[in-house]
Amino acid sequence: MIKGFGGIFWRTKNLEMITKWYSEVLKLEIGNWNGTMIKPESGNETIFSFFNENDSYFPLEQQVMINFQVHNVNEIIQHLEHMGVPLAKNLEVSEFGKFIWIEDPEGRLIELWEKNG
């Protein structure tokens, strides 16, 4: 029944600042309609998962966490260092791949994931 995700939408206090940050830090090409279209690549997956309300995987005050799949976490870390964006949590490696976390200027935790294989 479900074909895929149609989009991710959220409110922001400062549209100009937040679109500039996502453009520069995460290299998303934000259009004049304040959004971008991310086209899936072969091998890319989108995970939809629920967490208990008291799960500490991401901040309790944050209802939703976005996860971007990336090609190379090490290159992303170098880029973030160059941009002056600190990691919110250090690199973790698991059977699912490599993970790092950053915060956007409004304090939203963002997970960046390099999938194994």
Image (spheres, rainbow, N blue to C red):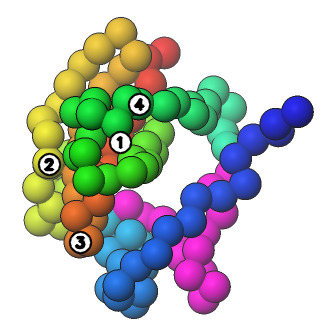
Kind of residue indicated by mark 1: Leu
Q: Upstream in the sequence, badge 3 or badge 4?
A: 4
Q: Measure the C-alpha gap from mark 3 to mark 1.
A: 16 Å
Magenta stretch secondary structure, dominant:
loop
Secondary element under disc 3, as helix, strand or loop, is loop
Q: Which residues are magenta?
A: 26-39
Q: What amino acid type should be assigned to the residue bearing mark 4?
A: Phe
Q: Left or right of 90: which side holds 77?
A: right
Q: Residue at x 65, y 58 (%)?
A: 7
Mark nearer the viewer, 1 or 4: 4
- What residue appears at the point 75 percent right and 41 percent down from the top-left corner? 4
Residue of label 2: 87
Q: Which residue is mark 3?
A: 105
In the rendering, at what x and y percent does residue 38 appear?
A: 62, 56
Residue 60 shown in magenta: no
Task: In the rendered structure, find residue 112 and report the number of the disc placed on it.
Answer: 1
Few, some or many C-alpha atoms within 10 Å of disc 2 (few <14, some 14-19, many ≥20)?
some
In the displayed image of the protein, which residue is found farthest to the right? 1
Q: Is residue 112 left or right of residue 42?
A: left
- Residue assigned mark 4: 51
